[in-house]
Image (spheres, helix red, strand yellow):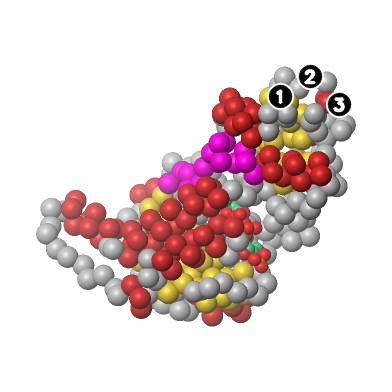
Amino acid sequence: MSTILMASQQDPVDLWRDSLAKEMPELEFRAYPDVGDPGDIDYALVYWAPHGLIASLPNVRAVFSIAAGCDHVLADPQLPPHLPIVRMVDDYLAAMMAEYALYGVLHFHRDMHYYRQEQLAARWSRAWPLYTPDTAVGILGLGAIGGDCARKLGALGFQVHGWSRGPKKMDGVTCHHGPDGLLEMAGQCRYLVCVLPLTSETQGIINSELIAAMPQGGYIINIARGGHQVDEDLLAALDSGHLGGIFLDVYNQEPLPPEHPYWRHDKVWITPHVAGELVPRSCAKSVAANIRRFEAGAPVPDLFDKSRGY
Ligand code: NDP
C-alpha cells in the first residue's frame, strides 16, 4: 500500500481525500502538517508546499503538481533535483480553460465591450459583427489546453491557427511553429489566445513586436501566466487603438495591485486567475492513473520535462 501526502495553501483537502479514496481505495491519504513518519510517504500532492517539505520525505518517488504548471514546485530551493514531477493534465481543466477562451473571443466578436458602454450611456445603437468564417483566431500553445480551445473555436466556425514549439498537425487547424511561425500567425489573426507554459522562451512573448504583427484593432486573451505579457506594451497598444481590447486572467503580480491601470481601463476585462479550476473529483482520476503507472513501472506521459521547461 502506498501513501500520498497533500500540502496545498488553497485546495480543498477533504474533497481530495474523498476523491482519491474513490479512485484508489488502497492509497493512504495524509494532509500536511499531519505527515506522520516522513519515511512512509511515497507521493507528494502539492501546490506551493512549504519549502523543504519534499526534501524531508526520504522515500518520496514523485511529486504531483496541483496545477498544469510546475512553477510552484520548482520554486522550492531544496527540491531534490532528480525527483519526477507530474503535471496536472485533466480533461475537465482543459474544458474550463476552453470555456473561458471561447467566452473571451465571443465577448469581443459579438461586441459585448461596445454594448456595455452603450448601456451605461443609455444609448440604443448597434455594432456590425464580422462574418465568423472570415475571422481567424490564433492559439499560442497547442497542448492539452490549447488543443481543446482550437477544436471548440473551430466548431464555432472560426478559422483556427495554432502555434507550438515543434511542428504539429491538427485537423481543421493551420499549424505554425518556431519564432517566425508566431509572427506569421499573428499577422492573420484578429484574436490571439495565450495558453502557453511560462518558460525562459515564452516569458514576455506578448510584447510590442507580436502586437505590431497583428492587424489593426485586434484582441488578446491571456489565460496562461502573467509573465507572458509585457504590461506597458499592451497598455500602449490599447491607448494607440492598435488593440481593440484585452481579456486577462493572469498578471505579472498577483493579486493585481489596486493602483494598476488594468483595473480601470475601459478596454481591459479582468478576472482574478480563475480560468481553470482543479476539481478534485476529476483530477483525482489522473493522479490515480499516474500512480498506477509508477507502481507498474510504466511510462508516465504527463511528466514535467526540465530541459524544455514545461
Ligand atoms: P502543455 O504542456 O500540454 O502544452 C504546452 C503547449 O505550448 C505545447 O503545444 C507546446 O509546444 C507549446 N509551447 C511551449 N513552449 C513553446 C515555445 N517556446 N514556443 C512555441 N510553443 C511552445 O500545457 P497545457 O496545455 O496543459 O497548459 C498550458 C498552460 O496553461 C500551463 O502551463 C499554465 O501556464 C496555463 N494554465 C493556466 C490556468 C489558469 O487558471 N489561468 C489553469 C491551467 C493552466 P509543443 O506541442 O511543440 O510541445
- Residue 36's mark? 2
Instruction: Indicate the quadrant where residue 55 lies.
Output: top right
Vertical comparison of 96 with 244: above or below: above
Q: Residue at x 81, y 44 (%)?
A: 296
- Depth order, front residue of 19/131: 19
Marks 1 and 2: in contact by CB < 8 Å?
Answer: yes
- Residue 295's mark? none
Give the amino acid type for the residue marked by disc 2 in the picture: Gly
Q: Is residue 171 at least partly visible in the picture?
A: yes
Q: Secondary structure at mark 1?
A: strand
Residue 36: x and y in percent read 78, 19
Reading the chain from its start, which is encountered first: label 3 or label 1? 1
The Cα–Cα distance between marks 3 and 1, rounded to whole angstroms, is: 13 Å
Marks 1 and 3: in contact by CB < 8 Å?
Answer: no
Is residue 187 rendered to the left or right of residue 38? left
- Residue segment shown in magenta: 271-286
